[in-house]
Each structure stands twice: as structure tokens, then as C-alpha cells.
Amino acid sequence: MIRFLLYLFFFYALWQLIKFVFRIAFQYWIKKNAGKAFYYQGNFGGRAGGNENRPVGDIRVESTGKGSSSSVRKGDEGEYVDFEEVS
């Protein structure tokens, strides 16, 4: 009976130790990676950082330098179709 209680105590202590180690490791991982979330926040398709001080409403078009390689000829774009969603 005493041996069974020792096993229970051993497994309980081991479980608590594992929880403690994983909690510390997870907190370290969160602190390490939290800066990356703020670094990439709001940067949709642009360069990393994205915190440029531009006035509100300023528009900038950046070219990729590939020229006009459109596969649709002028006049063949199609026509606008207004639709209504039916549920």
C-alpha cells in the first residue's frame, strides 16, 4: 500500500514539474516572438516594418519594373455585371 502511494506521489510530482517547465518555456517563447507580431502588423504586401510617416490620403504606386505584360487586350476586359445575392 505504501509503495502505491509513493508511486502516486512520484507521478504527481513529475506531472507538476513537467507543467512548470512547459509554462516557463511557453512564456519565454511568447516573449521572444511577441515583437515579431508588432513588427509585421499592418504590413500587407509591403516591406517589413511598414511604419512610414506619410500624410493621410497620400497615394504611392510602386512599379515592379516588368512593363506592361497584361494578357487581356484593350477592349476585351468584359463588362460590369451588377448582381444581387439571393439566400
Image (spheres, rainbow, N blue to C red):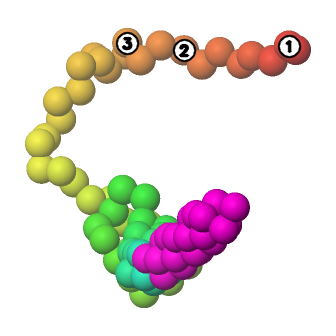
Type of amino acid under label 3: Asp
Image location (x, y in percent) of residue 19:
56, 71
| Disc 3 to disc 2, C-alpha distance | 9 Å
Q: Residue at 66% of width from left, 68% of height from top? A: 2
What residue lies at 29% left-to-right and 67% top-to-bottom?
47
Query: Which mark's residue is nearer the viewer, 2 or 1?
Result: 1
Between 66 and 49, the residue placed more toward the observer is 49
Dot 2: what SS? loop
82 relative to 39, above or below: above
x, y (%) of residue 83?
74, 16
Q: Which residues are magenta?
A: 1-26
Task: State which quadrant residue 86 falls in.
Answer: top right
Q: On the image, numbered disc 3 is attached to which residue?
A: 76
Query: Is residue 80 shown above or below 9?
Result: above
The answer to whether one can see residue 15 in this image is no
Badge 2: how crowded within 10 Å, few (<14), some, or many (20+)?
few
Please identify the quadrant where the C terminus is shown: top right
Name the foreground residue: 85 vs 60. 85
Question: Mark 2 near mark 1, Cβ–Cβ under 8 Å?
Answer: no
Quarter the N terminus occupies: bottom right
Mark sitting on residue 22: none
Task: Report which quarter residue 40 is drawn in.
Answer: bottom left
Chief SS of the magenta region? helix
Seen in the image, is 58 located left or right of residue 47? Answer: right
Name the residue tied to disc 2.
Answer: 79
Rounded to the nearest whole Å, what is the CA distance between mark 2 and mark 1? 22 Å
Residue found at the far left of this picture:
66
